[in-house]
Amino acid sequence: MRLNKCLYFSRSKPFIDSGGGGRRRTHQVFEALRALGPCEFITAVISDRKTHRKIHSKFRVYCNQHFVTGGEYKLWSPDRRVALYRLRAIARNWIKKGPNLSECDLAVVEDPIYFKPLVRKLKKLGIPVIASCQNIESLSYGQVSLKNQKEIFASEIDTLALCDLAVTISREDAWLLNCFNIRTFYFPYFPPQTVRDRLLAIRGRRRNHKKKNIILLGNAGNIATRKGMRKAIEYWQANNLERPAVKLLIAGYETDIHFKNIKSYPGIEFLGPLSNNELDKKLAGVKACLCYQEDGGGALTRIGEMLLAGIPVLTNTNSARSYYNLKGVIEFRDLPDLKNALDQADRFNDEIPRPDEPDPAGLINEIKRITTTKYM
């Protein structure tokens, strides 16, 4: 069955040779859907400043009216309230002034908890809805008030249950949603072609490159990533983990903003955001990449990317989700075990297998079953 029109609703901009792991994952799912027929990408990123200011003004009014006595947005952490309100406002605007929803025969909604009004409208219209789950948002306790986490989790599960299928980046998320009788398909992450080419070039350069240092790489704009990176940096500093030819390199989006108050230290080098060329040069010569995250769902795209580049990954148990037991992954339980993990950084000797690209045929067949059943 070939679809007449599919609408893909995303929090992010489309991927065009740049962007973090979230945009790369969005691109992967969006490109897979093209096999079904025409698919239109609709982004929640507001380029119009006037509209942006209007939404934020309304949010401030909402705060004054509801935050003292209650309201759903108060359940979330201060960092996420504005984002949640903005995305819900955009979802309502899509319903009123956006694309003609009744003309599409499939809708994909990214992380539906943010677009709940849109999901409800699509269900009323009888349109099949697929949830593209980058994370189960309520599992990241930096994003929600801990005392309200169970309530937000229940709301998120109820929203996902409205969808006909949830596509997850994480095997663990797929298992959890299946336990709630939500139809789920695990579709592992694999980077876009332009990123893939860069990573494979790095793999080739590493074969004859002297290795030194550990790189801690991440988007510090992400709450869970930022918290984990900060704890890893502070632990490294407090426990003097550097050694000859092993410093900790800190790189990534907004690392220059969020870590500028950390005191300088001989065993740590802050690189800040890097261009693709600068990052690739660093990755060609590092011993390993360090990933540390204490909470959150989904799967870390940078682990799969480092393995494709032939770089060993030192990762705590929570960060290793969906990558357990893969050659190239050196798992440690928590930061006190990091020193032992560092001692194993050389053990693979450039023999990390190249990860296989997942075949999208299984996902396409699953979607066809849903849409065929819906329109029979």
Image (cartoon, rainbow, N blue to C red):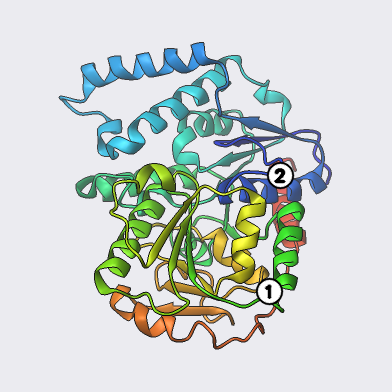
Reply above or below: 74 against 52: below
Q: Is residue 153 left or right of residue 343?
A: left
Amino acid tagged 1: Arg
Is any atom of residue 297 visible in this view?
yes
* Foreground pick, 91 / 193: 193
Give the crowd class for mark 1: few <14, some 14-19, many >=20 residues within 10 Å. Answer: many
Is any atom of residue 358 visible in this view?
no
Q: Quadrant of residue 297?
A: bottom left
Q: Is residue 142 left or right of residue 373?
A: left
* Foreground pick, 136 / 183: 136
Q: x, y (%) of residue 313?
A: 52, 73
Amino acid tagged 2: Asp
Residue most toward the left? 68
Q: Quadrant of residue 168?
A: bottom right
Reply above or below: 368 against 321: above
Q: Is residue 36 left or right of residue 187?
A: right
Q: Secondary structure at mark 1?
A: helix
* Foreground pick, 189 / 159: 189
- Residue at image mark 2: 17
- Residue at image mark 1: 206
Q: x, y (%) of residue 257?
A: 39, 41
Give the crowd class for mark 2: few <14, some 14-19, many >=20 residues within 10 Å. Answer: few
Reply above or below: 219 against 169: above
Mark 2 or 1: in front is 1
The residue lying at 38 percent from left, 58 percent from top is 229
The residue lying at 44 percent from left, 79 percent from top is 331
* Callouts 2 and 1 close, C-beta under 8 Å: no
